Image (cartoon, rainbow, N blue to C red):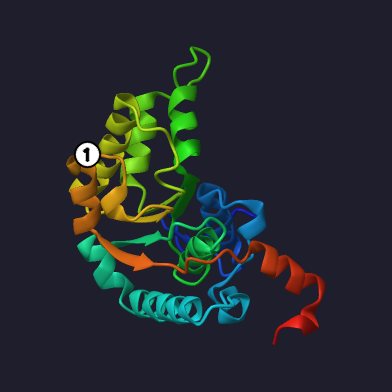
Amino acid sequence: CRGTGWVFTDYNTVKECECGIRQREIQESRLRFASIPETYKDVTLKDIKTKFYTKQESKDLIKAAGEFISWYLENLDKKIEEGKGIYLWSEVKGSGKTMLAAALANELINKHKRFVKFATSLDILDEIRATYDPHNEETESKLLDDLARADFLIIDDFGTERVTDWVGEKFYQIINGRYINKKVTFFTSNYDLKTLKYDDRITNRMRERSYIIHFPEESVREFKARVENNPTEVT
């Protein structure tokens, strides 16, 4: 194939070369498209451990969340058909929600060969605002359409943004577009869905198309840092 990834089978037909170049190119494309933060690029579902939580209630919640994610992935094709995603929330910052969302993204990319887009709600709004720059070739309508049509979209820290009429309208366009097209959306948030400061046009669609998972109300960042510096502290 001379590095092209394709070989001729006859005069008018080509097929993918067995060298694997095309598959590597596609995988690299998936990873670029995902935009997973560098900190979480290698995290897996096996890295989500109960040992990083000190409260029994937290351990029970993280175990239940892990079991649910396993069930969800076992039924992935059906969930895609239903357009059913996950709303992962806890009021405490640093409880591990983003880490789990990133691990799920990596699982979908690496094991299920899916295209996933990962972004914080603030990043999405910044990308939209950037299209207003006359030197930016990307248009707002194309960006919103891309976000609405991505097979999997993970919106991290949803609800941390200040909700104005403009913000509400932009997220309505994205979420409604995904609702209409039955595209799977995952959210992490510090708010119960009932307390999000968005109107019913948005929250009702999210509620209908999301499994709601309550994550531990316990921060593990400091605890994890201590354990990583002293691995014998927790087993």
Badge 1 crowding class, 10 Å Cα cut-off, few under 14, some 14 to 19, many 20 or more, is few
Taking 221 as reference, is 176 above or below it?
above
> What quarter of the picture does the N terminus occupy?
bottom right
Residue furthest to the bottom in view is 235
Taking 37 as reference, is 64 above or below it?
below
Taking 173 as reference, is 141 above or below it?
above
Expressed as whole percent of the image width and height from the top left, the position of residue 168 reads 30, 32
Tell whether 186 sits left or right of 39: left
Within the image, what quadrant is residue 10 found in? Answer: bottom left
Tag 1: amino acid: Asp
- Front residue (pair 39, 182): 39
> Does residue 1 appear in this view?
no
Q: What element carries label 1?
A: loop
- Front residue (pair 148, 169): 169
- Front residue (pair 213, 154): 213
Residue located at (26% from left, 53% from top): 194
Expressed as whole percent of the image width and height from the top left, the position of residue 129 reads 45, 24
Expressed as whole percent of the image width and height from the top left, the position of residue 91 reads 44, 57
> Does residue 13 appear in this view?
yes
- The residue beneath circle 1 is 199
Residue furthest to the top in view is 134
Expressed as whole percent of the image width and height from the top left, the position of residue 62 reads 47, 76
Residue located at (56% from left, 80% from top): 50
Taking 217 as reference, is 131 above or below it?
above
Residue located at (57% from left, 70% from top): 18
